[in-house]
Image (cartoon, coloured by chain):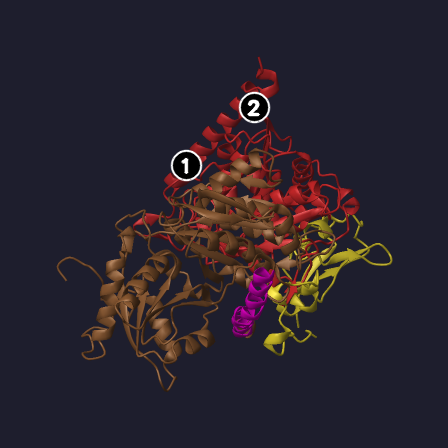
């Protein structure tokens, strides 16, 4: 059985029992993204406003006249989670200053899929991060436009087959590498950026808690396994996320004021990427050459990260 | 048995802006009707760790009076994550009859 | 006490908005309305207005941020023109569907292409069916008054709809006029503090922006249409209150020298003021001409239109936008549609003028009235004429 080493066995029992994201939502059976949302909300607590982009999570959670959310929630359109969030954050700030709402901090949290974050929502995200709003943006990345039927996004990994760059006799699937969104956001001088995965729930929740406390922008990139789109067995949803970390496909790290810290959950030695690819139907077509290409790239990216973790200093250390 | 989905009878009954004022009201919709297999917990093996609870995408696993973590079959979609992640192998997925 | 001021109308519009104490302003510059958000940011920077001015990175984000702000219970404002309005067009119909009382100033400008920064109505005409309340100012005073009225109308519990106030780009935005600017005290008396119907805040949990299945969508559209239609009642009430407090009268369709008129022009926006001079000239010559100045565009004032055209033999509807390949210009198509069932109705002609900022002269209006009179003897070959095109 594939289990996590060093997993604090009884800690889950101690996690907040409140379900802010209720059952009855219409997510696919085994949806990693729904799990990620559920965990995220437990870490955020009740003084939160959720701003949701159009996508799987919005569509499955609030179908008039019901809502899965036990938190205030607003959805407007697809590309604008970050800009709607900017408005919410500004309003809450102004109203609190004018004494029109209760005098306590309410955190604005924007959630979007990889489509609403990497691609169509990128402009708004960049603007909001650059302006320094007190917003946590969580990207729930299932590596394709899943809600519209598994189309290729900027987050789709090299070699994955999607409906708009399918594998075939003349194609090995996506021919471009995944956009490195975490580093792009870190370049916006965002003081806290982290990668996470629902398969490491306590790590994810701790990062959410940390980000919540930042007075300014913060960004968490959460890999969310989509059994439907990745063609993974539903019961292997958590395992797939774990393998992504164990093979180095999705390393867990934080960038705090420019300083890179690799999570202790990353393995000492990376497992061969084939272990991760072979349980997913979307990579079924890959040739040995392609797999080697992917393996080489993973080694390179991990070395780059380790190099940064070792050599880069935080802003406060670099101040004159 | 799944509760009837209630649509507003008339347009006048719609909330302004289609706003929803009932937090958590998706609980009216029993997704348990979706599943093809269900989790069965062997309490003699269950160590009450809560790993199944933490990994359930529906959040439908909770502790019963004796402290064992049990899935609420009104909502369980039968994904099998709990059975797969269960440390002592106490949960098994059994096909719905 | 209101103060008599001489100011560029865009700046006056910003001053009027500031008097309404918005909480959040999110705007992106675009000629010719840029002076409105710019001046508002001045007012905030000077400490005269306690608001958050979000320098958004696009118009789409401007209206989105206003949605977030309004959804969180704040009074929100934005301004745009032309391409900016089209860029935020994805969000435009969502605002009334979510019943968010956002106010927007539109400095009407031609829609590209070719790119043109000058005045016409093609921008707002592209958003006809969106569900917003829409008003047209003909001069600086109307601009100021409508900006303030807009907040009161939008936020009224029986309305809860966004309002856009249209002012002609350059023709109004960049023109200096003498105007009466209300005082803060007067505006405070007229416009109460915003009490939202609902707001995203943990103290009263709500989900805004649900998915609408086919099972409820038709009902939702009915509700949206009903809300806009019924808003007219409140608009008239607010205009009456305005008249009582400030002495200036507002009607959905203003009438100028319509007594005994046999031929009339129907205009929207600043060209109405030019048309007035033409009507005076024609009346001097003994022509029984009059002018209808439409101020309320949405909800469409069918009732007032039916009354206004009684007794008219000929009506020349002036459009400032083309509905390409359509049966006539946008305003004319709607006027014809509204008058279709009326037993006695005037002959309707349609002239599309002043596109992309081309000057509209008094002489043009005189000529158009003469054409409208001539049309009674010989109907024009086409339902509409793009007026003044060289070579046509």
The tint chain A carries is: red
On the image, the x and y values in percent for residue A125 come to: 51, 41
| Residue A292, disc | 1
Labels 2 & 1 near each other (Cβ < 8 A) = no
Residue holding disc 2: A309
The tint chain C carries is: brown
Chain identity of mark 2: A
Label 1 neighbour load within 10 Å: few <14, some 14-19, many 20+: some
Of residues B58 and C43, the one drawn nearer to the viewer in this rendering: C43
The tag earlier along the polypeptide, 2 or 1, is 1
What residue is drawn where x is 59% and y is 30%? Answer: A191
Q: Give the range drawn in magenta.
A: C217-244
Residue C238 is one of the magenta-drawn residues? yes
Residue at the bottom extreme, as displayed: C343
Q: In which quarter of the image is the C terminus of chain C?
A: bottom left
Above or below C356: residue C128 = below
On the image, the x and y values in percent for residue A145 come to: 47, 53
What residue is drawn where x is 22% and y is 62%? Answer: C387
Chain identity of mark 1: A
The tint chain B carries is: yellow
Residue A236 is one of the magenta-drawn residues? no
């Amino acid at each position: 059985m594939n289990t996590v080493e060093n997993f604090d066995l009884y800690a889950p029992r101690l996690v907040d029992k409140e379900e802010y994201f209720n059952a009855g939502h219409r997510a696919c059976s085994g949806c990693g993204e729904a799990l990620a949302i559920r965990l995220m909300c437990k870490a955020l607590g009740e003084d939160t406003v959720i701003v949701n982009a159009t996508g799987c999570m919005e569509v499955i959670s609030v179908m008039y006249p019901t809502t899965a959310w036990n938190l205030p929630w607003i959805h407007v359109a697809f590309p604008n989670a970050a800009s709607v969030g900017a408005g919410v954050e500004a309003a809450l700030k102004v109203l609190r200053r004018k004494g029109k709402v209760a005098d306590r901090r309410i955190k604005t949290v924007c959630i979007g899929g990889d489509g609403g974050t990497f691609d169509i929502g990128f402009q708004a995200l960049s603007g909001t991060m650059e302006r320094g709003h007190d917003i946590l943006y969580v990207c729930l990345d299932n590596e394709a436009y899943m809600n519209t039927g598994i189309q290729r996004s900027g987050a789709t990994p090299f070699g994955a087959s999607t409906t708009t760059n399918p594998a075939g006799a003349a194609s090995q699937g996506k021919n471009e590498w995944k956009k490195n969104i975490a580093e792009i956001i870190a370049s916006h001088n965002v003081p806290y950026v982290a990668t996470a995965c629902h398969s490491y729930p306590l790590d994810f929740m701790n990062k959410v808690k940390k980000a919540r406390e930042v007075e300014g922008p913060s960004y968490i990139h959460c890999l969310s396994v989509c059994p439907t789109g990745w063609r993974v067995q539903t019961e292997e949803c958590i395992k797939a996320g774990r393998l992504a970390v164990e093979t180095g496909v999705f390393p867990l790290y934080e960038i705090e004021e420019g300083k890179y810290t690799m999570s202790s959950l990353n393995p000492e030695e990376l497992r061969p990427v084939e272990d991760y690819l072979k349980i997913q139907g979307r990579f079924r077509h890959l040739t040995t050459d392609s797999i080697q290409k992917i393996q080489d790239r993973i080694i390179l990216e991990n070395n780059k990260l380790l190099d940064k973790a070792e050599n880069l200093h935080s802003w406060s250390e670099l101040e004159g | 048995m799944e509760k009837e989905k209630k649509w507003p009878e008339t347009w006048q009954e719609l909330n302004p802006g289609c706003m929803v004022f009932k937090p958590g009201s998706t609980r009216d919709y029993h997704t348990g009707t979706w599943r093809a297999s269900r989790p069965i917990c062997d309490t003699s093996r269950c160590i009450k760790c809560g790993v199944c609870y933490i990994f359930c995408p529906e959040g439908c696993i909770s502790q019963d009076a004796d402290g064992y973590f049990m899935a609420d079959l009104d909502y369980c979609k039968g994904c099998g994550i709990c059975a797969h992640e269960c440390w002592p192998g106490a949960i098994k997925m059994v096909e719905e009859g | 006490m209101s103060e008599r001021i001489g100011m560029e109308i865009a700046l006056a519009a910003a001053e009027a908005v500031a008097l309404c104490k918005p909480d959040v302003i999110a705007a992106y510059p675009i000629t010719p309305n840029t002076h409105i958000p710019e001046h508002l940011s001045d007012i905030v920077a000077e400490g005269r207005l306690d608001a958050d001015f979000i320098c958004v990175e696009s118009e789409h984000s401007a209206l989105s941020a206003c949605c977030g702000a309004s959804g969180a219970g704040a009074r929100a404002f934005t301004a745009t023109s032309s391409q900016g309005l089209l860029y935020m067009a994805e969000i435009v119909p969502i605002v009334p569907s979510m019943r968010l009382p956002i106010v927007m100033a539109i400095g009407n400008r031609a829609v590209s292409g070719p790119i043109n920064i000058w005045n016409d109505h093609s921008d707002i005409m592209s958003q006809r069916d969106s569900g917003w309340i829409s008003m047209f100012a003909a001069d600086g005073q109307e601009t100021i008054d409508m900006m303030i009225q807009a907040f009161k109308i939008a936020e009224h519990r029986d309305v809860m709809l966004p309002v856009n106030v249209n002012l002609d780009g350059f023709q109004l935005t960049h023109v200096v006029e003498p105007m009466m600017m209300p005082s803060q005290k007067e505006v405070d008396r007229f416009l109460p503090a915003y009490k939202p119907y609902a707001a995203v805040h943990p103290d009263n949990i709500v989900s805004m922006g649900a998915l609408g299945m086919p099972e409820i969508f038709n009902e939702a559209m009915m509700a949206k249409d009903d809300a806009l239609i019924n808003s007219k009642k409140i608009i008239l009430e607010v205009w009456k209150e305005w008249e009582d407090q400030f002495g200036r009268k507002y009607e959905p369709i203003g009438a100028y020298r319509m007594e005994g008129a046999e031929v009339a022009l129907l205009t929207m926006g600043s060209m109405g003021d030019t048309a007035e001079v033409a009507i005076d000239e024609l009346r001097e010559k003994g022509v029984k001409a009059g002018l209808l100045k439409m101020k309320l565009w949405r909800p469409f004032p069918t009732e007032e239109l039916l009354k206004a055209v009684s007794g008219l033999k000929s009506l020349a509807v002036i459009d400032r936008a083309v509905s390409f390949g359509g049966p006539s210009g946008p305003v004319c198509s709607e006027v014809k549609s509204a008058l279709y069932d009326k037993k006695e109705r005037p002959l309707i002609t349609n002239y599309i003028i002043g596109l992309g900022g081309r000057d509209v002269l008094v002489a043009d209006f005189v000529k158009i009235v003469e054409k409208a009179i001539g049309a009674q003897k010989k109907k024009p070959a086409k339902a509409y004429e793009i007026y003044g095109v060289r070579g046509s």
